[in-house]
Amino acid sequence: MSVLENLESLSSAEEFFDVLGVPYDPQVVQVARLHIMRRMGQYLRGDGGEAADDAALFALCKAHLEQAYADFVASSPIAERVFKVHQEAIAPKDPPQRPFVPLSALTGE
């Protein structure tokens, strides 16, 4: 079974940590599991996720999981803003539109 096939068969963040051999604090993973996994995916896509062989791919996945986990040990899901809903929460908002009433509507012209 290839590394990718093995990872695709996993069903929890903890399984990723165990299979890739990355030590973790269960409390951190419990709070930020989806954020960590999403960030790992972002790192892999940034690299192109390409490796010469299974051993290199395993090392790449392990390094990116370690990096993603470290991001959330040092910070928080809200501060890291991995998901769109968090990004939009701080996005600049358009100024509210005020209703426009033309002067002619007031004068009856």
Image: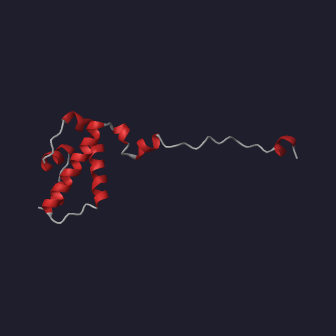
Residue at x 18% of width, y 48% of height: 16
Q: Please identify the quadrant where the N terminus is shown.
A: bottom left
The answer to whether one can see residue 7 in this image is yes
Residue at x 43% of width, y 44% of height: 87
Residue at x 31% of width, y 37% of height: 75
Q: Is residue 27 above or below residue 70?
A: above
Residue at x 87% of width, y 41% of height: 107
Counting every numbered tag in the picture gives: 0
Foreground pick, 39 / 105: 39
Q: Position of residue 38 (x, y in %)?
A: 30, 48
Q: Position of residue 13 (x, y in %)?
A: 21, 45
Q: Residue furthest bottom?
A: 52
The answer to whether one can see residue 2 in this image is no
Foreground pick, 97 / 53: 53
Please say which color scheme the image uses: secondary structure
Q: Is residue 47 left or right of residue 59?
A: right
For residue 51, which quarter of the picture?
Answer: bottom left
Q: Position of residue 95 (x, y in %)?
A: 61, 41
Q: Position of residue 101 (x, y in %)?
A: 76, 43
Q: Is residue 107 above or below residue 61?
A: above
